[in-house]
Image (cartoon, helix red, strand yellow):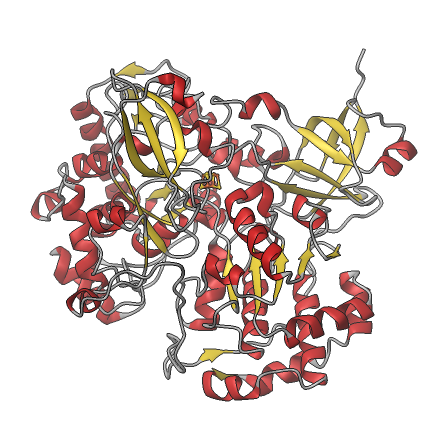
Amino acid sequence: AIADKKIEKWTYATCGYCSTGCAIEVGTDKDGVPVGSRGVADADVNRGKLCVKGLFEHELFESAGRGDVPLMRSNIHDEYQEASWDESFEKMASEIKRIQDTYGPDSFAIVSTGQILTEGFYTLGKLARGVIGTNNYDGNTTLCMASAVSGYKRSFGSDGPPGCYEDFEHTDCLIAWGSNLPEQHPIIYWRFKEAQEKRKFPLIVIDPRVTMLAQNADMHLAITPGTDVVLMNSLMHVILAEGLEDQDYIKANTTGFDELAAEVKNYDPITASKICGIDEDTIRNVARLYAKAGAAMNIWTMGINQSTHGSDGVVGLNNLSLLTGNIGKKGGTSLSITGQCNAMGTREWSSCSGLPGYRLLENEQDRIDIGKYWGVDPEFFPKKRGLAQTDIFPAIETGAIKGLWLVGTNPMTSMPNTARIRKTLEKLECCVVQDSYLDVETTQYAHIFLPAAIWAEKEGVFTNTERRVNIIRKVKEPYGQSKTDLHIFNGLAKQFEQGRKMNFPDNFHEVFDEMRELSKGRLVDISGMTHDLIEQNKGIQWPYTQEQVDKGEKPLKGGKRLYTEPATFRHPGGRAKLIPLPFIDNNEKPDEQYPFWLNSGRLVEHFHSRTRTGKVGNNNKYSPTPFMEMNPDTAAEQGIEHQSYVRVISRRGDAVVMVMLTQRVPRTMVFIPFHFFDCVNRLTLGLLDPHSRQPAFKQCAVRIEHVNQE
Ligand code: SF4
């Protein structure tokens, strides 16, 4: 079909949906109209493949609901009025100054995204930390990856996934925890499947639901929701009891072994099975299979991260990997599969949780170095991280925060307990929404709307799940009067005296050069990369240093790992920490009043709140409406029929959905996809992980009522 469309030019980009990071080319016709998308054949990541989302990505540019002009209004109940960019920047800056002068610098908060280009993230960090001076700046990545970040930092001393996709081609055993690759990351699934067919290693899936990945597993462990840490501790109990640990690796690379061993003694398989619902023989078998494999991998996604024990779950998987010497070796890793296309970019460069290049606000030298480089008094920086996104909304409720700038995020659909979010947003004195789409639900609450260029209407880089930096070239000019994020941040910076004193380059190469310079000697060293080199290599994994370039070393094909040498972890002394994880059960569990577990997750056709996939290709045709998976036996007991409508009720709210009967969920559980407005997140629990502040989206209690359908 693409061949019929008379494509005159193909432009290189990186897919703008999930974190797999597929290299894509967008074809334009003689008038420059995007008419086709195809995978890049010799790209390491996807080897010419794209999933159902990437295949229709060229339709994004002219999709319905795009914002084409800045808009303003004094009251959220008034109609929007069109404004010029200058008027919008002036108004926004004057509101920020008014709010900060009246209520203090942290009373204006910023919540960004995992979707924009890394050069944009870096510039927003410079603006937020160096000019506006609020400490309440975070990304919506708190909703998906904060637990992975926190867990990596606790175990290894720094964020940064240690493994790569090539590990599938070397592993002897793969355990997937709360990860449904075929729907969430289809091309990573294809990479895994191709490797497994060649080498026949076992796949063990830990998930309360029979996901598509579980259907393809050698063993599926349908765990009781929220009890992963118990299962991890019990696996370690068996490994230590049977002497299957790698003592040489432990002695050379870790601290904390004795404390961990003392804790996991409490989790013998008989005791653990009563909590996590997996029988004792299965626990023993999985422990042996994993520990005896020459190289073994743990991968995970939101099933681990989106929990009140998310950070502990990540540490638990790191503990398992370290105990068995499965870090830094081919096929042996602990790999978080990230959510958004550039969640990694924001973790590395945006300054949401610190300063660029994985620097910390808590570290004096880091503050001095960045202050000197940017031309900012280091005393201007806060000395510890401010509120996470999930704490910013409660702070709006209490009145501590009065102004909010939302960049490429839609909390009205994506946050838990959205009825509460609605009331919270109404309290703001100034709400700014910067988005490519005017019809995202959160714009209802905006005083200022800034139309942003979408995906390949701009140029810059993303980092994918395996630390691969890849480039997006501009396919066409921004829609209407919309501007690139970089230009929006720079336009606002110039409204402030401090911003005029600092360097805010409009050219994305110059921004990247600043990042390269600041990366030198850091774990995330990208100093050897240039935009052109990245495109020539179809993506380069970090670290790739100037030193390597000087020595004539080319970027590595295939896969690159962290922590391959002894004692190279980022904790003082270079050792990783083995951390004991006592389990305290604080989940909301089913009871007489709310007898079902509610689980939520993603569908292959859609991405996040459907702002894009609700409008392009066939994605919406296949999944146009919310539904609830229910076990047929439970439905029969309750007199509920396939495709009837029911009301699902939790302690937070209710939602009406169509029933889909399926054995994918056990009798005690229902499942609702999270993409739809006013649906599952009216029900979900706002409880947070204490380390990462990530919410528990994956487990809460609900009851179900019939809806009168006459
Ligand atoms: Fe895009 Fe992810 Fe699909 Fe690849 S797997 S085409 S990155 S959505």
Image quarter in which the C terminus is found: top right
**In the image, farthest residue toward the right:** 637
220 or 595: nearer the viewer: 220
Residue at x 41% of width, y 67% of height: 561
Task: Identify the residue at the far top of this view.
Answer: 710
Q: Is residue 267 left or right of residue 270?
A: left
The quadrant of the rendering that contains the N terminus is top left
Total marks shown come to 0
Q: Is residue 434 visible?
A: no
Vertical comparison of 12 with 145: above or below: above
- As displayed, is residue 37 above or below residue 340? above
Please indicate whether residue 591 sits to the left or right of residue 466 in the image.
Answer: right
In which quadrant of the rendered view does residue 309 lie? bottom right
Identify the image quadrant of residue 488: top left
Quadrant in the rendering for residue 296: bottom right
Q: x, y percentage for residue 407?
A: 35, 37
Residue at 29% over, 49% down: 134
Q: Where's residue 112, x and y in %?
A: 36, 42
Above or below: residue 547 compared with residue 73: below
Viewer can see residue 670: yes
Q: Residue at x 14, y 55 (%)?
A: 374
Q: Residue furthest left?
A: 501
Position in image of residue 705 (x %, y %): 80, 29
> In this image, 447 relative to 699: left or right?
left
| Residue at image coords 52%, 40% | 415
Front-lying residue, 350 or 212: 212
Q: Nearer the viewer, residue 694 or 430?
A: 694
